[in-house]
Image (spheres, rainbow, N blue to C red):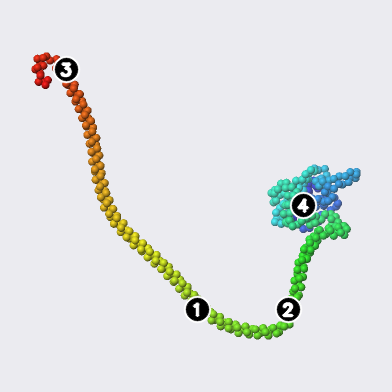
Amino acid sequence: MKLKSINLKNIRTFKDEKIDLGTGTISATGDNGSGKTTIIESIGHALFGYDPEYRRGESIKLPNGQEYSPNVRNMFLRKGTKTGEIHINFEDDMGGDFLVVNKITSTAQEWEIYRNGMIKDQDPGKQGILNEVRNVLNIKDSYRGTLENYFSHIVTVLQGEIVDPFLKSQQKRKDYFDEILGISYYRDAERDFVHVKNYFSEILQSLREDIKELTGAVESLPEKRKNLQKRKKEIKNLQNKVDSLEDILEDLTKRKKKLDGLEKEINDLEKEKEKIITKINALQKQLEKAKERRNECEEARNLANKLKKDAKNYEKLEKELENIQTLLDKKNKLENKLGESKTQLREWECRADELKKKIRKRGLQRLQHFSNGRYLRYGKFKN
């Protein structure tokens, strides 16, 4: 994190002033009341949530005897003003440009944060700013202290705080520097590693005992060397025998490989033979079935030929049947016509009988007009 500038508006002694900050360690010097502490406290307040102990609301006794309990906002505002602003410009390790704006009134505070000229978060609140600063500073969660402690112990030292710890009592001075140096963590580490120390002490003692045993073994080393030479000769003779046996073994291994190959070929041929026998048996069965099917086909063929003849006869009979049916149809038509003719004939006979009766009746009526002479004249006609 690199602080670049701070702009204070209506903040205590500053009406509207921008202070450019250099690189490295910065020392603020000047007369009392010139605003050195204001600059440092403004940075601590806006970025780290740091407020000096004498500005945290403790009651102040005024000359007239009354007590006054200030708040942080009132202590930062320039006398006679109601609003003030703290603008802090800084860079992170990646070169990102940040601007934090802390707006202070007599009743509330607001924050704004910009990244590379673009507003990143409007009014993220105090905690949002603190989280952003932790990220920029790459402060891990393993750091147990607050950003206030980080600011007061690492970032800056306020006026009078350099010599203040040395003016404390011995016990308070010890407690103060133990906290800064993390002595308690070292004590805890020493206590936690006692068993490790004991473990390595036991290993060291065991190694010392092993050294004593090895020292005794070294004294008998010449005799062991003679035995070693003797053993080497025996090993050499055995090695020659082993080499000879290895040659024999190699020859036998080659023969065995050949035999294994022949055995494999025999097994493969046996399997092939079994397959061929199986195929032959299957083909014989198929041949028998084919013969049976052939006989069945012959029978079917004869039956088919017979059926052809029967089919021809059947067709011939069907044609004859059709002719007979045609004749029957004609017969039925003729019978129907004959029935109709008989009916008509009977009608005609009935009509003829009626006509005869009418004629006879008329004839009799006419005959009554003839005289007796005339009646005799026409007697033959009457008869």
Quadrant assignment for the C terminus: top left
Residue 356 quadrant: top left
Q: Secondary structure at mark 3?
A: helix
Tell me how far mark 1 sits from mark 2, CA to CA.
Answer: 51 Å
Can residue 206 be spotted in the picture?
yes
In terms of sequence position, does the residue under pointer 3 or pointer 1 come before the other?
A: 1
Residue in the picture at 87% in, 57% down: 168
Residue in the picture at 72% in, 47% down: 124
Residue in the picture at 84% in, 50% down: 54
Percent coordinates x, y for residue 2 in the rendering = 74, 55
In terms of sequence position, does the residue under pointer 3 or pointer 2 come before the other?
A: 2
Q: Secondary structure at mark 1?
A: helix
Residue 365: which disc? Answer: 3
Contact (Cβ within 8 Å) of mark 1 with mark 2: no
The residue identified by callout 2 is: 214
Instruction: Categorize mark 2 by other alpha carbons within 10 Å: few (<14), some (14-19), many (20+).
Output: few
Residue 255: which disc? Answer: 1
Can residue 151 be spotted in the picture?
no
The type of residue carrying mark 1 is: Arg
The type of residue carrying mark 3 is: Gln
In terms of sequence position, does the residue under pointer 2 or pointer 4 come before the other?
A: 4
Residue 319: which disc? Answer: none
